[in-house]
Image: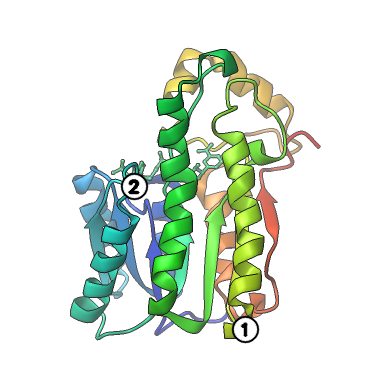
């Protein structure tokens, strides 16, 4: 795949798991990377240091996207581009930060629903809107959807439909940014073996077994299974791929 040298990426939630894997993959292919995180400063600093070890520039910005803070993040990204990236524009926006929600439908509170909406839908929407003026023509936007946008997991009624909404947002944004030769796509993992699922995997190992059994490749996903597809969407080879939902789930619920 062609080099991404000279490009600048923003990966939200880049401190660990899938976001970290994407940040390191883009850096390994030549891109400089800004990551965001909520509170895990140690993990964010470690990711920055690993990106710098690859010879790329890196900065970590802390923001809690569960409030209405996307605007603050846009301001911080614009300042960081000026201070640490020679005033470059962003080439890649990877809307990865997200939270899990596993509550039976009858018990989902409005607070829970609002929290999931803020982090998993409103933040990517408002970040995209705010960052577009700071993005280079020809740029790439990737949203992280979910298998649960396609199939039903009973305890994920607050989460799955909003991931489906993010996947649809990718199509709307693709139409919006096409005239600037930019693309927007959604990459949708199945169940990943990350901190995101730790609690559920520990308390309900039978669910993990069930999901594995329903997956053609017969295992959970790892960040490494997904990050290359996201990097591909940032590559010159993917210049004509836009408005798509690409499921990277090992073939779950086929
Ligand atoms: N894991 C799965 O099975 C799975 C399946 C399908 C889709 N996805 C999606 O894939 C994406 C990444 O998942 P993951 O498994 O890598 O998750 P993860 O291990 O929980 O990492 C989440 C990342 O997002 C950040 N973050 C969480 N809440 C935030 C908030 N309120 N404000 C700002 N940043 C916040 C975290 O920062 P801190 O570390 O500082 O908290 C961390 O960097 C998410 O969009 C998720 O919905 C995951």
Neighbours of disc 2 within 10 Å: few (<14), some (14-19), many (20+)? many
Q: Residue furthest front?
A: 110
Q: Is mark 2 within 8 Å of ligand 1?
A: yes
Disc on res. 179: 1
Up-down: is 121 above or below 159? below
Residue 92: x percent and y percent?
46, 71
Tell me which residue sits at (61%, 47%) in the image. 165
Q: Quadrant of residue 242?
A: bottom right
Tell me which residue sits at (66%, 62%) in the image. 171
Up-down: is 188 above or below 239? above
Could you say whether the residue bearing mark 1 is in a helix, strand or loop? helix
Q: Quadrant of the N terminus?
A: bottom right
Q: Which residue is mark 2?
A: 65
CA gap between label 1 and label 2 equals 29 Å
Disc on res. 92: none
Q: Are marks 1 and 2 in contact (CB under 8 Å)?
A: no
Near-viewer residue (120 or 91): 120
Up-down: is 45 above or below 161? below
Image quadrant of ligand 1 equals top left
Near-viewer residue (2 or 76): 76
Could you say whether the residue bearing mark 2 is in a helix, strand or loop? loop
Q: Is residue 63 visible?
A: yes
């Amino acid at each position: 795949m062609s080099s991404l040298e000279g490009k600048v990426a923003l990966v939200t939630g880049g401190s660990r798991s899938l976001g970290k894997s994407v940040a390191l993959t883009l850096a390994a292919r030549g891109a400089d990377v800004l990551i965001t995180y909520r509170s895990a400063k140690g993990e964010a600093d470690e990711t920055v240091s690993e990106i710098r070890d690859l010879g790329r520039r890196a900065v970590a910005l802390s923001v809690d996207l569960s409030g209405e803070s996307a605007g603050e993040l846009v301001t911080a990204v614009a300042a960081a581009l000026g201070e640490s990236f020679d005033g470059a524009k962003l080439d890649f926006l990877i809307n990865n930060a997200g939270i899990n929600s596993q509550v039976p439908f009858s018990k989902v509170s409005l607070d829970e629903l609002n929290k999931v909406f803020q982090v998993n839908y409103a933040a990517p929407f408002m970040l995209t809107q705010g960052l577009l003026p700071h993005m280079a023509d020809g740029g790439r936007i990737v949203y992280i959807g979910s298998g649960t946008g396609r199939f039903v997991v009973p305890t994920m009624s607050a989460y799955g439909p909003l991931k489906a909404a993010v996947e649809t947002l990718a199509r709307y944004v693709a139409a919006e940014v096409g005239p600037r030769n930019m693309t927007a796509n959604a990459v949708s993992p199945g169940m990943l073996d990350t901190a995101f699922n730790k609690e559920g995997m520990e308390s309900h190992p039978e669910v993990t077994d069930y999901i594995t059994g329903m997956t053609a490749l017969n295992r959970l996903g790892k960040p490494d299974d997904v990050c290359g597809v996201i990097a591909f969407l940032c590559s010159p080879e993917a210049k004509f791929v836009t408005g798509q939902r690409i499921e990277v789930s090992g073939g779950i619920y086929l």
